[in-house]
Amino acid sequence: MNQQSIQNELNNSLCYTSNYVPLNKQKMSKITNLSSQIEKQLPAGLVTLIQRAGKTAASQGQGLYLVGGVVRDLLLGQTNFDLDLVVEGNAIELAQYLVEINHGKITTHPRFNTAKLQWDKWSVDLATARSETYARPGALPTVTPGSIKNDLFRRDFTINAMAIELNPSRYGELIDLYGGRDDLEHKLIRILHEKSFTDDATRIWRGLRYEQRLDFRLEPTTLKLLKRDIPMLDTISGDRIRYELECILKEERPEKVLHRAEELGVLPKLSSTLKSNGWLTEKFEQARQTNFPNPPPSGLYLALLVYPLTNEETEPLISFLRLPKALAQTIRDTIDIKTKLPALANSELTPSSIYRLLHAYSPQAVTTNSLACESPVARQHIQLFLDKLRYVKPALTGDDLKRMGVAPGPRMKEILQRLHEARLDGKITSKQGEVELIEGWLD
Ligand code: ATP
Ligand code: MG
């Protein structure tokens, strides 16, 4: 296939080429009104808010639109109360005006010309319509004010690039310039132009996330371009990849995304030794059962993902992703505890020895090891620590010991430690027992 025919094939399968030529895929003539879906699926408080916002914007001569994920989910009949509004005009001015009439709270970001409105228990993001260009692959985009059309074109996938008119004269009308609705019907994830993944390779991870969440498929040309552009992930900063990973770990079944990422060769871009296999699926499932009815914390998922790695393999990942201090510590602890597993697998171990082996580590790292370790005995010991031993404390304090004639210093520390051990091993069970034990030692 020569270069021109490859280009033609790409142009035909994507909704738009990179120079914005619309294809016949668009159904601009068909007007769909989603006001009844809005009414049915969004809480009354939010409906009132967007209707008022639409009227206010119209009175100021500005266009206002509901955009992105909420439009997609309204069409899919799925719950999503995260509202994103786009203003053809000035988002901050509109938000300030809305706050005056609604008595809500407003947070503004003048640099990006965006605002967050909080009203009752609802919060809504307002952004000024913009177009984006990329000076080089992976760079943050150069932003200029634009129309809703520009704003939709800068988006990741056709299913996320639809908008709903909020202006009262056209309230509820769907704007679908790139065939998003068709793609929803056919369960397809499709980029808007062939440079999409090159401009911003985080869309590779995003694409896998939506594909797996919605049980869709990457449209064939999108899949081809995604594979072609996997090396472009090297242009993305660790902070942005970390954000995408956090989003994945908040999904209902993150392992599906990780598994697909491995299949396509995306996962090794994170670390060449990471694996998404049956073992991981089983451990993620156990993590969900353990935390039910809450979802597992994303730190626990991450620690399970990196569990098979060595210390030398995790360090570059921790520094590339610039993990927050506490999370980095959890990961380091998780890997370090693995070196204690042979000792923990000894069935003769006393509770105080179990405590000594585990107490210095973050509870999440200990939990990870209880889920991940092979030895049933070690797992039992770790579970005993988590359920009981970590909460055991002597009743007597340093002050009590002082009153009993022990001077503060290393000796007091040692006595307190021995007291703690005696408690852990069940040698004493009451405060009186502790007093008698110490009196015996002092004699
Ligand atoms: P989710 O349900 O995952 O929150 P969402 O569609 O609301 O889905 P967000 O990450 O909240 O996704 O982003 C809001 C919208 O911003 C998206 O629908 C998409 O149109 C656009 N968007 C977000 N990230 C990108 C990106 N990297 N490139 C292009 N458009 C993006
Ligand atoms: Mg969202």
Image (spheres, rainbow, N blue to C red):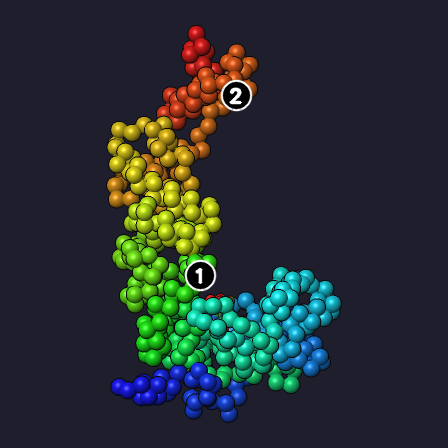
Q: Mark 2 points at which residue?
A: 398
Label 1 amino acid? Ser
Q: What is the quadrant of residue 151 in the picture?
A: bottom right
Neighbour class for label 1 at 10 Å: few (<14), some, many (≥20)?
Answer: some
At x 31%, y 88%, the residue is 5
Q: Which of 80 and 414 is in front in this view?
A: 414
Q: Which of marks 2 and 1 is nearer the N terminus?
A: 1
Q: Is mark 1 on a helix, strand or loop?
A: loop
Q: Is residue 198 visible to the viewer in this orientation of the structure?
A: yes
Residue 364: give its label.
none
Q: Which of 113 and 174 is in front in this view?
A: 113
At x 41%, y 69%, the residue is 201
Q: What is the quadrant of residue 346 in the picture?
A: top left
Q: Is residue 286 visible to the viewer in this orientation of the structure?
A: no
Q: Answer above or below: position of 150 versus 421.
A: below
Q: Where is residue 137 in the image (x, y as percent from the top left)?
A: 43, 71
Q: Position of residue 321 (x, y in %)?
A: 42, 55
Q: Mark 1 points at which residue?
A: 237
Q: Where is residue 223 in the image (x, y as percent from the top left)?
A: 33, 75
Label 2 amino acid? Gly
